[in-house]
Image (spheres, rainbow, N blue to C red):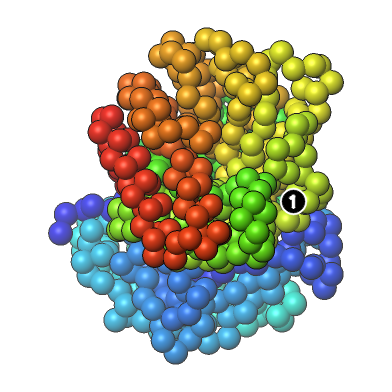
């Protein structure tokens, strides 16, 4: 097989559970954020985000945490053929907290864990031969079976002409040299560990470690002397990581630290040092494997490390290529890097879960309107919940196995329907506004953030705001404040945001009306993932909206058209009007589809199957009209 991968990383793979209360002892942590962790897994993700073709060679358990790891790796673009599912062992776990600047106690749950069962049989000749480089890591030389696996990988890589990279990755307690409570301990001298690692050094092309890690590899408790000892047995490029001082890269003889090449440094606030070395390695490899000069490699590595220490988690916080490029292009860098809104938006937009390129959604998030229908029919409101389940079934019959379909559902009457929609794999949007409120109000969930944490991570926060440029200043100020509060809550809990603007009900809808609102929302600092907008009167109006979005947020997923209970013929005309507006990705229509069926079903005039069939027919007709207007359903 030809070399189709840039790098295969080998070794530790865990689920990290990070305490979300900053400044707390681990004993006092009340809630945790989950992410993929472990040095090789972090590097696989970090390099993939920087455009390298990476793969991970490890083991995970045959349980939900192992499933999470494999799914997240795939979402990140990491090849998972080398991830073996171990039916007998559990995926490793790590519990961590940020107690103080640079102080992060951690507990490793790794007793007989899956990744430490890695063995020679797990190492595929084909996988290793397909890579330009492999990364072996220190912890996996601590056990005979994992050591044998990495030694086999080294032999195969060298036979295939690949490079061998050694991340010393020294964790004393994973070598049995410190207790469970000393997970943060970085250095314990050990002749046994040094002798093990020194056997690896001659086969390496690149060796990377902190001062403490170089000391354990060199067997000498002095960084410079340790580097000289390593150089005596290895011609590899050596990279000394020095924390806030950046790094030094050495080729050839080493007499002083000045013999190396240092890159640009980045003085930023240190928020959490965990995972910084893996982010550093990701940046280093992204440069080194592309043949960039040492100074540029060091700068890329330092920058990636800066991102990691400025944020809470490990792999989820690592930069993408777009984010790194934007960072390096800045004239001035904020010391509190995690507060840089521009970089945070690029990070969010380039790491969020894949979304549909085209979206056909049945909107059944209505509450007030269906309550009125139930009251008129003399039906108890409890029946609304059952009707929304029927609406999801109708959408499912139209969608089949095709991608690009979704629903809008509320949590008041739509909870059972939400479960059904999730099982169908639909895109799901959920409203948060008080129905009909103007000014915008969230009175049923005054603390937005805590409520949104209960939502599944792929549910999209949808908010309808009746907004017009001619509104009184006081009204607009309150609307702005609520939209800002919502945007902050959505980003804080990691949920996508869809902002729905209806202007035509409270003023004239001119050429620039909606475009001016869109620009104003961006001026507030709000960047919705989606817009939901009413049909416009002209192509020119759509072009202005499209231009506003493209200028302010090129990462916006797009616009979906709303229905406003318009007749099918009117909506079909609206679809044709946006055929050449690339930002319009689909539609989210409700009462045009379900209103008649809801009224008749609530009155007891039709049964479930008749209601489903009627809604499916109407929804299918709109899907056909959308496709007939030149649009196609595409996978994300």
Q: Nearer the viewer, residue 393 or 542?
A: 393
Q: Tell me what residue is drawn at x 75 percent, y 77 percent.
A: 181
Quadrant location of the N terminus in the rendered image:
bottom left
Q: Tell me what residue is drawn at x 74 percent, y 59 percent.
A: 20
Q: Using the image, determine if residue 470 lies above or below residue 89.
A: above
In the rendered image, is residue 575 in sight? no
Q: Position of residue 470 (x, y in %)?
A: 71, 13
Q: Tell me what residue is drawn at x 70 percent, y 80 percent.
A: 180
Q: Nearer the viewer, residue 268 or 601?
A: 601
In the rendered image, is residue 450 in sight? yes
Does dot 1 land on a helix, a strand or a loop?
Answer: helix
Q: Position of residue 49 (x, y in %)?
A: 45, 46
- Is residue 405 rendered to the left or right of residue 385? left
Q: Tell me what residue is drawn at x 28 percent, y 40 percent.
A: 624
- Is residue 476 rendered to the left or right of residue 539? right
- Is residue 546 rendered to the left or right of residue 25? left
Q: Using the image, determine if residue 577 lies above or below residue 353.
A: above
Q: Position of residue 412 (x, y in %)?
A: 67, 58
The residue singled out by tag 1 in the image is: 449
Q: Nearer the viewer, residue 242 or 415?
A: 415
Query: Which quadrant of the structure image shows residue 569?
Result: top left
- Is residue 343 rendered to the left or right of residue 298? right
Which residue is the extreme one toward the bottom? Answer: 88
């Amino acid at each position: 097989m030809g070399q189709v991968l840039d790098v295969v990383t080998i070794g530790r793979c865990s689920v990290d559970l990070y305490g979300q209360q900053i400044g707390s002892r681990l004993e006092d942590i009340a809630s945790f954020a989950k992410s993929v962790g472990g040095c090789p897994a972090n590097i696989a993700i970090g390099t993939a985000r920087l455009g390298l073709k990476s793969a991970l060679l490890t083991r995970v358990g045959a349980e939900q945490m192992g499933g999470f790891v494999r799914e997240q790796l795939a979402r990140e673009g990491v090849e998972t053929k080398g991830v073996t599912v171990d039916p007998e062992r559990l995926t490793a776990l790590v519990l961590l907290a940020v107690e103080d600047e640079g102080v992060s106690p951690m507990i490793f749950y790794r007793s007989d864990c899956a990744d430490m069962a890695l063995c020679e049989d797990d190492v595929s000749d084909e996988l290793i031969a397909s890579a330009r480089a492999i990364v072996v890591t220190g912890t996996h030389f601590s056990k005979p079976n994992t050591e044998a696996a990495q030694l086999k990988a080294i032999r195969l890589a060298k036979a295939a002409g690949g490079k061998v990279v050694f991340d010393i990755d020294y964790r004393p307690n994973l070598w049995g040299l410190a207790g469970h409570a000393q997970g943060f301990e970085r250095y314990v001298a050990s002749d046994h560990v040094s002798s093990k690692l020194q056997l690896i050094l001659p086969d390496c092309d690149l060796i990377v470690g902190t001062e403490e890690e170089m000391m354990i590899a060199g067997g000498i408790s002095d960084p410079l002397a340790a580097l000289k000892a390593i150089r005596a047995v290895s011609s590899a490029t050596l990279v000394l990581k020095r924390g806030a001082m950046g790094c030094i890269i050495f080729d050839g003889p080493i007499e002083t630290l000045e013999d190396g090449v240092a890159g640009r440094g980045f003085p930023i606030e240190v928020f959490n040092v965990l995972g910084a070395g893996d982010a550093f390695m990701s940046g280093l490899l992204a440069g080194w494997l592309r043949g960039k000069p040492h100074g540029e490699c060091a700068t890329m590595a330092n920058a990636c490390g800066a991102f990691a220490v400025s944020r809470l988690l490990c792999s989820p916080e690592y930069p993408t290529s777009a984010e790194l490029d934007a960072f390096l292009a800045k004239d001035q860098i904020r010391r509190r890097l995690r507060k840089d809104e521009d970089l945070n938006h690029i990070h969010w937009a380039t790491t969020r879960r894949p979304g549909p390129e085209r979206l056909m959604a049945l909107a059944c998030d209505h509450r007030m309107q269906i309550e009125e229908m139930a009251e008129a029919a003399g039906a108890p409101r409890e029946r609304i919940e059952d009707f929304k389940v029927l609406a999801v079934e109708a959408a499912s019959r139209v969608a089949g196995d095709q991608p690009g379909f979704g629903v809008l559902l509320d949590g008041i009457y739509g909870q059972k329907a939400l479960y059904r929609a999730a099982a169908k794999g639909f895109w799901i949007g959920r409203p948060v506004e008080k129905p009909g409120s103007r000014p915008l109000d969230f009175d049923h969930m005054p603390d937005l953030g805590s409520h949104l944490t209960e939502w599944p991570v792929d549910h999209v926060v949808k908010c309808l705001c009746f907004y017009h440029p001619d509104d009184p200043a006081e009204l607009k100020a309150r609307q702005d404040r609520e939209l800002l509060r919502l945007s902050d809550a959505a980003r804080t809990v990691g949920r996508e945001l869809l902002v729905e603007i209806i202007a035509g009900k409270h003023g004239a809808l001119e050429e620039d009306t909606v475009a001016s609102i869109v620009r104003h929302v961006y001026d507030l600092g709000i960047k919705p993932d989606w817009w939901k907008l009413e049909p416009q009167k002209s192509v020119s109006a759509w072009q202005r909206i499209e231009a506003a979005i493209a200028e302010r947020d090129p990462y916006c997923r797009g616009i979906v058209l709303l229905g406003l209970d318009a007749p099918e013929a009117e909506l079909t005309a609206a679809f044709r009007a946006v055929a050449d507006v690339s930002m319009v990705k689909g539609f989210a229509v409700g009462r045009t589809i379900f209103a008649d069926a809801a009224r008749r079903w609530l009155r007891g005039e039709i049964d479930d199957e008749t209601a489903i069939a009627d809604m499916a027919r109407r929804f299918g007709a709109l899907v056909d009209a959308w496709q007939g207007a030149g649009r196609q359903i595409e996978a994300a």
